[in-house]
Image (cartoon, helix red, strand yellow):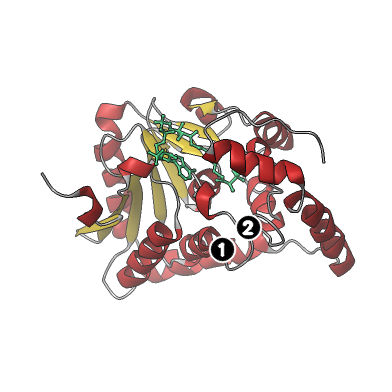
Amino acid sequence: MTDVASQPLVTVTVTDHVATVSLNNAAKRNALSAALLDAFIDALSGLKGQDVRAVILRAAPGLPVWSAGHDIKELPHGHEDPLGYADPLERALRAIREFPYPVIAMIHGTVWGGAFDLVLSCDMIVADETASFAITPVNLGLPYNTTGLLHFIGRLPMNLIKEMFFTATPLKADDAAKWHIVNHLVPSAELDSFTQALAEGMTHKAPLAVAVIKEQLRVLADYQPIAAQVFERIQDMRRVVYESADFQEGINAFLEKRKAVFTGK
Ligand code: YXS
């Protein structure tokens, strides 16, 4: 029996210009810890030197949870922005968005919190019937960051964004297809082969054109002018939230495996 602790947090295989990157920490439900995210970022960076023209990002086979989101135990709580620019999750999102070839999120199982932001940062999403997607800062009392909200605004209708953020209720696979969150919803028995075929098809296209068009789309979509004083006002509002007793309560409730009781303070 292989010692779980010795297994890599992220595994990479490459076949015919397609790399498959698997998140591999079943015991912690692929919680996005700094260690796992650093391994992921390193894996993606290492692929740049190879003749890889498409990436499939998946959880290790058979896991019922694709990823449980940001490692809550590692969320700064106190007088520090819990989702700052240097946060490992934010670095991973940028790594995906700046990777020169398509990254396809292949989803079997449930996706939580910041892992949903990670999946939305991929270029395409292929899911099966077991997939669900939830964004859950209100379960912790955490003020999501502005970059992250802009990711959602660029991908989802505002009424859906508000329902998902304010209820933290997982969106089931067929509703994710209805809202065009996923490119394809396929039976789980076909998920691997369908996603592999989608990836392979893109590897026969002109790679320079694919890479430049991906970067053009990124810079155009990310161009969201915001006045400095508006940004500063938003940061002040967020600071009140991440310094609140409620945020501390949200973290403590998770760590103590109990339901949080929020007071609005
Ligand atoms: O008790 P042990 O040591 O075995 O560890 C347990 C959990 O503590 C751990 N684990 C996590 N550790 C850190 N961060 C997490 N997000 C996290 N999720 C789980 O994994 C071990 C097994 O967990 P358990 O027993 O709960 O597994 P389960 O199969 O019964 O339930 C799976 C889940 C995913 C439904 C459940 O683990 C869960 O609800 N996890 C939290 C999901 C969540 O709220 N994620 C949001 C994280 S915060 C985030 O991403 C953003 C900052 S935001 O807040 O803005 O969304």
The quarter of the image holding the C terminus is top right
Amino acid type, label 2 = Leu
Q: Quadrant of residue 194?
A: top left
Q: Position of residue 93 (x, y in %)?
A: 52, 59
Task: Please report the residue visible at 38 percent of the width from the left and 45 percent of the height from the top.
Answer: 30
Q: What number of labels is visible?
A: 2
List x then y, in percent, for residue 137. Answer: 65, 41
Residue indicated by mark 2: 83
The kind of secondary structure element at disc 1 is loop
The residue positioned farthest toward the front in the image shown = 256
* Residue 121 picture location, percent across and down: 52, 53
Image side of residue 203 versus residue 258, left or right = left
For marks 2 and 1, give the CA distance: 6 Å
Mark 2 sits near ligand 1, with its Cβ under 8 Å away:
yes
Image vertical order of residue 98 relative to residue 201, above or below: below
Q: Which mark is residue 87?
A: 1
Please give the name of the residue rendered at 87% of the width and 60% of the height, measured from the top-left corner. 233
Q: Report if the CB atoms under discs 2 and 1 are less than 8 Å apart.
A: yes
Q: Which residue is most to the bottom?
A: 49
Q: Of residues 100 and 205, which is closer to you in this image?
A: 100
- Left or right, 10 with respect to 82, comes to left
Q: If the image is split into quadrants, where does the N terminus sit?
A: top left
The amino acid on which the numbered mark 1 sits, given as a three-letter code, is Asp
Q: Is residue 234 above or below residue 169?
A: below
Please state if 198 lies on the left or on the right of 98 as rendered: left
Q: Position of residue 217 (x, y in %)?
A: 57, 61
Q: Is residue 240 visible?
A: yes
Badge 1: residue crowd in 10 Å (few <14, some 14–19, many ≥20): some
110 sits left or right of 227 in the view: left
Q: Residue at horizontal 64%, vertical 40%?
A: 250
